[in-house]
Amino acid sequence: MPRARGQTLIEMVVMLPVILLALFCLIYLAKFAVVSERAELALRYGMLTGFDIGAGAYTAGNIYQNIDLEGLPAPCATAPPAIFSDSAPFPGPSSAPYWQPDATPTSTCTTTTVGLGGAQFLASHYLASTLVTVAAKVNVPAYLQPLLGTQPQTVTSAASFVHAAYPGLIMYCSNEVYNRVWGAITAGGTTGTPPPNYGNKNGC
């Protein structure tokens, strides 16, 4: 029995660090997974709010606003960083600091317009694509740095949705539409001085 007890003690001394390392690795992976899931949530929220904002651009007011390009660039909503802390825009208490990113999350939003061919004055000639990107960083614990390195691990989520181009974007991309709108607003262009023609730009 004394020999068996001594052998058990040696096995425990050898295996305990391995078990603890595996346990803390699982905890770190759980944090990484939580941050990744919240990045996806922030992305979906940003795309939803971006569409809601853009829906208000399909108006005559948008046309008047963009005759001198005051309304450009197109409406584009980034994801709110507070989603990563489980606070605003959601009700309830914030998450514990451990389950939040170790640096301030970043979010970008860009809208591009694609011409499908055909007559430029047709609204169906253009489609817009809005790309929302979310990124957050999670620091690597010291005990995992020999395996994963010292640089923080980055969680990235990106997606784009296609929708009809806003009137301002169509005017920006098409000389023909721009000139027709200017002529209609100014009664044939006889009043005032037209601003520079911004049509036929790259990326349209």
Image (spheres, rainbow, N blue to C red):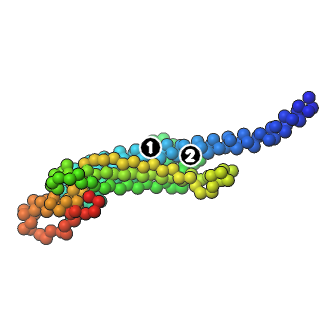
Number of other residues with Cα within 10 Å of mark 2, as a class: few under 14, some 14 to 19, many 20 or more? many
* Residue in the picture at 31% in, 51% down: 129
Q: Are circles 1 and 2 on residues that touch, CB within 8 Å?
A: no
Query: Is residue 82 something that shows in the picture?
Result: no
Extreme-right residue of the structure: 2
* Residue in the picture at 16% in, 58% down: 177
* Residue in the picture at 21% in, 63% down: 199
Extreme-top residue of the structure: 1
**Residue 66, image quadrant:** bottom left
- Residue 151 at x, y = what percent? 59, 57
Residue 142 vs residue 15, the one in the foreground: 15
Element type where label 1 sits in the image: helix
Residue 180 vs residue 185, the one in the foreground: 180
Number of other residues with Cα within 10 Å of mark 1, as a class: few under 14, some 14 to 19, many 20 or more? some
Residue 178 vs residue 186, the one in the foreground: 178
Say which residue label 1 marks: 41
Say which residue label 2 marks: 32
Element type where label 2 sits in the image: helix
User: What residue type is disc 2 on?
Assistant: Phe
* Residue in the picture at 28% in, 52% down: 128
